[in-house]
Amino acid sequence: MLLNINSFQLTDLSTISKLSVDGEFECYTLEDAVRPVKVMGKTAIPEGTFGVVLYTSPKHGLVPLLVGIPDFAYVEIHPGNSNLDSEGCILPGMTFTTDWVSSSVQAFTALFAKIKGAIDNGDTVSITVARS
């Protein structure tokens, strides 16, 4: 399974993107702002392709975790609405406005089911990130 994140709205606080699963639009996402120099817990992940595994987060329970990102660790996909909820993680949403995604639990639940189903079937899951 291949997830793609394509950013289209970058502000000083956040990055809004479209997330697709195997080429089909799934949801919007919110991450922290893209920065030229990483600020811990306040910077979007860089462009590239990374692995996705399941991880039991102390804060969010069982979630997808991105692996293999240089200089980043514990980048989760979990529900949330704004950069204040992110700390470097990816927040899915059904709709968006500037610096905000809505219906995040609904978007997360649908996305998580697809990722978990693929992993449970023995498929490799990866994510490719492209910035505008």
Image (cartoon, helix red, strand yellow):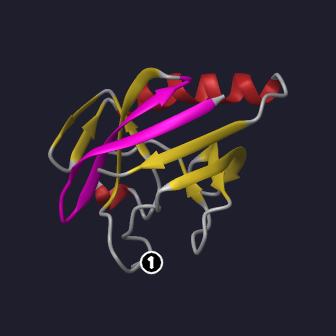
The magenta stretch is 2-22
Residue 120 placement: quadrant: top right
Q: Residue at 26% across / 57% down in the picture? A: 14
Q: Along the line of sight, which residue is nearer the eye, 124 or 55? A: 124
What amino acid is at disc 1? Met
Q: Residue furthest top?
A: 24
Left or right of 92 on screen, residue 56: right
What residue is pinned by disc 1?
Answer: 40
x and y percent of residue 96 in the render? Answer: 22, 35
Left or right of 39 on screen, residue 77: right
Q: Residue at 76% across / 30% down in the picture? A: 119
x and y percent of residue 5 in the render? Answer: 43, 41
What is the quadrant of the N terminus in the image? top right
Residue 9 lies in the magenta-colored region: yes
Q: How many marks?
A: 1
Q: Secondary structure at mark 1?
A: loop
x and y percent of residue 28 in the render? Answer: 34, 34
Q: Residue at 32% across / 27% down in the picture? A: 94
Left or right of 16 on screen, residue 11: left
